[in-house]
Amino acid sequence: MFGKGKPKSSDLELVLHDLEMETEAEGTFGSELQGRKDNRVAPAVLSNGKDAQGVQENGLLSPSKTLAVANGTAGNHGVENGSNVRQDRTRKDTEELQRVASVMSNQVPDDKAMEDDVKNFLKNLAKNRLREKVFYVAAVCSLVVVAFGLLALQWLIPYYFAVSAPVLIGLRLYLYCTKKWQYFMLDFCYFGNVITYIYIWAAPAEPRLFQIVFTIANGPLVIAVFFFRNSIVFHSIDRMTSVFIHSLPAYVAYGVRWYSPQTSVHWYTPFPTETEFQDPSFIWLLAVPLACYVGHALLYAVVVNGILRPSPEYWNSYRFMTAKKNGVVYKALNMFGPKFLYFNYNLLNVLMCLVSMLLCQIWYRWFIAHAVFLAVAFIIKAWNGATFYMDVFSQGKGLSDWD
């Protein structure tokens, strides 16, 4: 960002030293020769009193005048005072001096440009600090509201989700478009948020649709917390958005499943009653949600990899998970060779989704198991956030998502 400093002068010293030996003592040399960084002038040039006086009066040579010396345009080259000096410079020496002088002239920082860079940096830093402070406060308040809603006023949860989900997803879409990450927005977790949003507004009293929402919200969405290392980092819009996207649908399902009367108090229509939750259907609680996941994966492969085919500069979940060639995930996916990398990636996702959905049969039937599961997921997010603040933020990194 800031202007570059002057280059190292080792190459320049060699060229000037060679030039000193060749220009030793002759006379109408009325120009000056630029010295090194410490402003010393080549001693061979100052050996003649008249030349020394001229240098003192006129000051140091500019890089262009140094080139004039190297090209022989500044005066006569001769041999005096008993010194035998080569009269013809080799083209290699001349070109080297030209190169060094050119690099010097191009890399000398512009004081005004540097000052402007500093001002812009401080301005952006102040802007980012204010933005991150505001979001920090909003994130803390949101966490308090969610906790209060889960424990005391369950009717707050669907309202909070209805308001916050469009705002957070909209902010993420804008942020990701600026970073060329928009293909993350096609992941299954956003489908899970959309279907949850449709459920609470379109058919909150439909128990079969609720079973689909419950499995999707408490299955692959919460499991993503572990795989993508979601972390509670209050100042980070991106990280907190990931936390809410993967957690809020599960909290809505938790409130409706275990506190249906309280959750329905101020909603426009009641959610299913306790009797309607009895004897869940294998089809609606497992088969249909799994079919939704597989269908989404196939549609994603056709649209993204078959039609759009984004260039390597655009990131998506597959590229993110396989970016570290020495990582455990990449080695596991690459066990059959690069040709099967994408297939293995999707197969692993389907298997993990199936396992998480099978566990939802437990979460749906037993309150304690469901509560402990969500509590463990929250602890993991808090631990990841603590790790970020201690290991990353403490080193001055991760200050802003907008850099």
Image: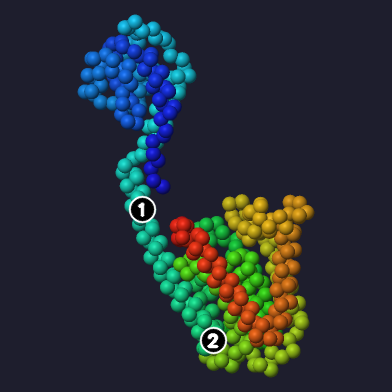
Q: Residue at x 48, y 81 (%)?
A: 145
Q: Position of residue 323 (x, y in %)?
A: 63, 54
In this view, the residue in front, 255 or 184, is: 255
Above or below residue 258? Residue 5 is above
Q: Nearer the viewer, mark 2 or mark 1?
A: 2
Evaluate whether residue 174 shows in this view. no
Residue furthest to the right = 336
- Label drawn at residue 151: 2
Q: How many marks?
A: 2
Above or below residue 246? Residue 126 is above
In this picture the colour scheme is rainbow
Where residue 199 sits, quadrant-wise, is bottom right
Above or below residue 398? Residue 15 is above
Question: Is 43 on the left-hand or right-hand side of 297?
Answer: left
Q: Residue at x 43, y 23 (%)?
A: 14
The three-letter code of the residue at mark 2 reads Leu
Secondary element under disc 2, as helix, strand or loop, is: helix
Within 10 Å of the Cα at label 2, are there few (<14), some (14-19), or many (20+) other Cα atoms? few
Where residue 362 sits, quadrant-wise, is bottom right
- Label drawn at residue 120: 1
In this view, the residue in front, 349 or 161, is: 349
Q: Position of residue 262 (x, y in %)?
A: 56, 92
Secondary element under disc 1, as helix, strand or loop, is: helix
Above or below residue 75? Residue 279 is below
Evaluate whether residue 91 shows in this view. yes
Within 10 Å of the Cα at label 1, are there few (<14), some (14-19), or many (20+) other Cα atoms? few
In this view, the residue in front, 297 or 149, is: 149
The three-letter code of the residue at mark 1 reads Asn
